[in-house]
Amino acid sequence: MSVRVDHEVVIVGTGFSGVGMAVALRAAGVDDFVMLEKADEIGGTWRENRYPGCESDIPSHLYSFSFELNPYWSRTYAPADEIQDYLLFCVEKYDLRRHVSFDSTVQQATYDEASATWEITVASSWGTLRTVRTRALILGVGALHEPVVPEIPGLETFAGELMHTATWQPGTTVTAKRVAVIGTGSSGVQIVPPLVEDADAVTVFQRSAPWVLPRVNTEYSDKLIDTFEQHPAALQAHRTRIRATHELKAIEFTRRPGVRKAASRIAQEHLRAAVKTPELRARLTPDYTIGCRRPILSNDYYPALAQGHVTLETDPIYHVEPHAVVTSGGVAHRADVLVLATGFDPSGSYRYLGITGANGRVLADDWASGIESYLGVTVPNYPNMFVLLGPNTLVAHTSTLLMVEAQIGLVMKLLRERENRRASSVAVRPQVVPGFTAELARRTDKSVLRTPGCRGWYLDSDGTNRTLWPGSVAEYERRTAKPEMIDYEFN
Ligand code: NAP
C-alpha cells in the first residue's frame, strides 16, 4: 500500500546519538530526515546535566566523535559546558540545525504493517499534536535519561529547593545554605566538592560507599593544542593511545582478580591519604568488589568529606520533613537545599514513547519484565525501528560514543540492505534474540557483576544485566561491522 511519507527517517533526540546518526545519513546522501527534540536546544546528557562539578569521566579526546576530532579540549576530562559546545559545533559544521524540530515530544509511534511505515504523534508544549510518517524510526533518546526519584516518605513536603542532579538549575547558589545530598555514585561524587566549597553545611547520605580512584586531569598547554591543531596525525595518535589503554585496562581488570586487588589497594591508599579519622575511613570503605559498578575518579571527593562542616550520614533515611532529612536513628539533618544524586532508570527512556509495533505489540509491555534486543539495536516485531545505546550496549571502561558509532554503522548497513533488496521493512528475526540474550547472561555470570555484594543500576531488580556490554568495544565493532543478514528478515 502506498501512503504519503513525510520523511525517509525520523531520529528521536539530538544528543550525541542523534547527531552522530544525522551526520551518517548526510554522508550517505540522505537529506530527507527530521530530528525530533523535546527541548528548545540541541543536546542530551550534556544539555540536561548542568550541576556543579559535572564533567566527563572519560578523556574527552576519546569521548568525542571519531570523524570530528577536536584539538581544543582544555583538559583531559572536559567540563559539561565544553562537551555541550562541542556537540553544538558539530551541529553547525554538518548543517544539521535545519533538520531539527524543537519542542517536539514523541507521544506515540505506531507501526503500520500495510505500508511498512511508522506514524509518530508529536506533541508541542502548547498542547498541539501533529503526525509524522516515516520509513525508519531511530531512537536516540539516551540510556540515562529518566531520573530516579527515591520513594522516601515526606519527600514531597520538603519546603526548600529540591533538585535531582539532572534537573539542576544553572545559577542556583548554595552560599550560606545548608545542603543535603542523597546518593554517592558518579554524580554524587562530582557534585559534593563544589557544594562543600560554597555551602555553610553539607550532609551526604551514603547508602553504599563507592570505590574512588585518583585522577590525573591535565590541562592541555597552548603548545600541545597547537600541535594537535597542526598535526592531525598527532591528535589521532593521542586518541588511539587513550583508547588502547582503556580497553587493555578493562580486559586486565575483568579477567585478572589480581589486577582488581591492586586497584582496590590504590583506592584504599587514596582514601587513607585524604581522610585521617579511622571511623570515617571505615564508613567510606566499600563492601563490594571494585569494578562491579562504574569506576569513579576524583581527587577532591574525600578531602571534601573530611572538612569540618561536612557530615557523612550512613544511617538509612527514615523520612523527609519540610526543613530536614531524618534518619532511622532519629537524627534530623536540617537542609535548605536537597539534592537527589540518585541516578537514572535505564529502561525509563522508552517507557513514555508509546511505541506499538507489528501485530499490535506494545514495547512497554514487551519490555515490562526487562529490556532486550539484538546487539542493542533491533527488536523483533518492531520493523524499521532502531535503537541507539539500547539494551546491553553501555560500557563502563571506555567511551560509550565508540558503541554509538558502531550502532550507527549497523543501522546504515541495514537500511542499505533494505534498499538493495527492494524491501520495505527490516527486522531482527525473533528466534535470534533468545540465543543472544543467553550469551549475555552466560558472559555476565563470569564477570565481576556476579561477585558477592554486587548491586547497582547495571543489574535490574532480578539481578539481570540489561545495561552493560560484556565484552570489548573491538568485539562489538566487529559484530556490528559485518552483520549476518540471515539474522534479519526483509519484507
Ligand atoms: P548511580 O550510580 O545510580 O548512583 C545513585 C546513588 O544514589 C547511589 O549511591 C545509590 O545508593 C543512591 N541512592 C539511590 N536511591 C537511594 C535511596 N532511596 N536512598 C539512599 N540512597 C539512594 O547514579 P549516578 O551517580 O547519577 O550515575 C549514574 C551513571 O551516570 C554513572 O554510572 C555513569 O554511567 C553516568 N554518569 C557519568 C558521569 C560522567 O561521565 N562524568 C557523571 C555522572 C553520571 P546505592 O549505591 O546504595 O544504590
Image (cartoon, rainbow, N blue to C red):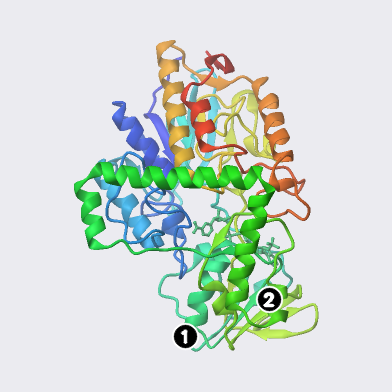
Residue 366 higher or lower than 186, as above or below: above
Q: Quadrant of residue 290?
A: bottom right
Q: Secondary structure at mark 1?
A: loop
Q: Where is residue 265 shown, x and y percent of the image?
A: 64, 63
Q: Is mark 2 within 8 Å of ligand 1?
A: no
On screen, residue 95 versus residue 6, left or right, reads left
Q: Quadrant of residue 204?
A: bottom right
Q: Where is residue 67 shown, x and y percent of the image?
A: 32, 39
In terms of image quarters, where does ligand 1 lie?
Answer: bottom right
For badge 2, the amino acid type reads: Arg
| Residue that carries the numbered disc 2 in the rendered image | 281
For the point 61% across and 25% down, the residue is 381
For the point 60% across and 63% down, the residue is 266
Residue 397 higher or lower than 285, as above or below: above
**Quick one: label 1, few (<14), some, or many (20+) residues within 10 Å?**
some
Q: Secondary structure at mark 2?
A: helix
| Residue that carries the numbered disc 1 in the rendered image | 175
Which is nearer the eye, 37 or 23?
A: 23
Q: Residue furthest left?
A: 230
